[in-house]
Amino acid sequence: MHILQLCKKNPYPPADGEAIAILSVTKELHKAGHKVTALVMNTPKHTFNPAQMPPEVKAVAQFRAEFVDTRLKPLQALKCLLLNRSYNIDRFVSAGYAAALRQLLQTDRFDVVQMEGVYLAPYLPLIRQLAPQLPVVMRTHNIEHIIWQRLAAETNNPVKRAYLTLLARQFKAYEQTMLPCFNGLVPISPLDARQLEEMGCKQPMYLMPAGFNEENYPFSPPGNNLSGSDICYLGSLDWLPNQQGLEWIFTRVLPLVRQQLPNATLFVAGRNAPPGFLQQQIPGVVLVGEVPNAAAFLQQHSVVAVPLFSGSGMRVKIIEALALGKPVVCTSVAAEGIACTPGKDLLIANTPEEFANNLLKLLKNPGFCNQISYNARNFAMQHHNNTALVAGLIGFYQQLLTQ
């Protein structure tokens, strides 16, 4: 098959969960003998010249990048507000990207179009116009309006809460209108699949959780080199839900941990830290910044913390940590969509006291930490092996082509 993959960001370098999820599937499709053409958006936040990709990445797809200016524009936002239109979606509408898509559809033959997220949905009418018989599949990394609903609920400022609630309502209306129009849907979790059905989506679906390539995630039980005070966090620092979670762990969790372990240190890695982030030094917090290799960063640390109270879909970083056998402490929202057993494969906590106690339990008990580590690795191998997941995706596409 020849698959046209549309992406709202360049998946290289794979420095965040979405990029990792996109590129890992592209690699597996190539490994399975299929041809992939990837039309990606270079945005002010995520820009990379495909010509500078390593040869092993260039080999998996024909990458073409088009610049799309997604920066916030107050006048455009006001216009969308007055027209009751989703500004979140509007930011990704680009004449240049549409022209590149048009050229590809007119000069090449594709079997399936795979859109990586609902932000690409505005380009569906163009595909229907130029290639009406071509199956178009939406891979839903998140149910986006759920993220905005939760952000609104977690916001204390009444004006900001009202605006976020409006954005969520506009996003929900857009998703309910557009998502049923695709030939197939690829949700990332059972919860997302149920929510899609509740929004009126009746077309075929293939449930494909985030996966990992075993050769890239060597297993080493953390208890072998447990420092007794080492915690890490990895996530995009410009994403509002991540910022909220970090503020919570900085102010309400880490002080409780350091009461019992004064040397406990939280290493924070991630790209696009906003201006002023961690401007004031917080005891026990080290800002690492962007790291070139997420798996290598996780391997260096003993325990992974994922404090999240807003979001949807599946946390790819948790899957990465489980694949490496890293003990994870996370909130219930962070664990959504991951069919693991709490207390066995990872630890879940939703209050500062619970979160701190679970971190301490792992840091103080190497034997318990090792047991969670082995369980995590086994779970990831059974449920998130990319080779098996993408084989199912290929079968799903072949079924669509016969309909």
Image (cartoon, grey):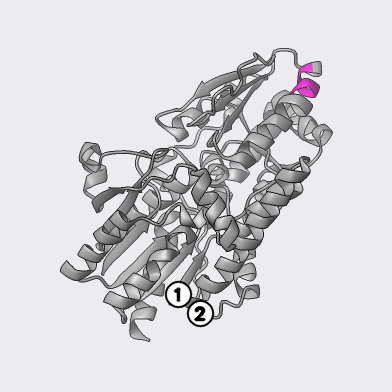
The 10 Å Cα crowd at callout 2, few under 14, some 14 to 19, many 20 or more, is few
Q: Is residue 257 magenta?
A: yes
Mark 2 sits on what residue?
Answer: 203
Mark 1 sits on what residue?
Answer: 182
CA–CA distance in space, label 1 to label 2: 8 Å
Q: Is residue 64 magenta?
A: no
Which quadrant is the C terminus positioned in? bottom left
Quadrant location of residue 26? bottom left
Which quadrant is the N terminus positioned in? bottom left
Q: Is residue 233 above or below residue 280?
A: below
Give whichever of 280, 340 is nearer the camera: 280
Q: Identify the residue shown where x is 40% and y is 29%.
A: 292
The single residue placed furthest to the bottom in the displayed view is: 403
Of badges 1 and 2, nearer the viewer stands: 1
| Left or right of residue 68: residue 354 | right
Q: Earlier in the sequence, mark 1 or mark 2?
A: 1
Answer yes or no: is residue 341 visible.
no
| Left or right of residue 392: residue 365 | right
Q: Give the magenta range.
A: 254-258
The main secondary structure of the magenta stretch is helix
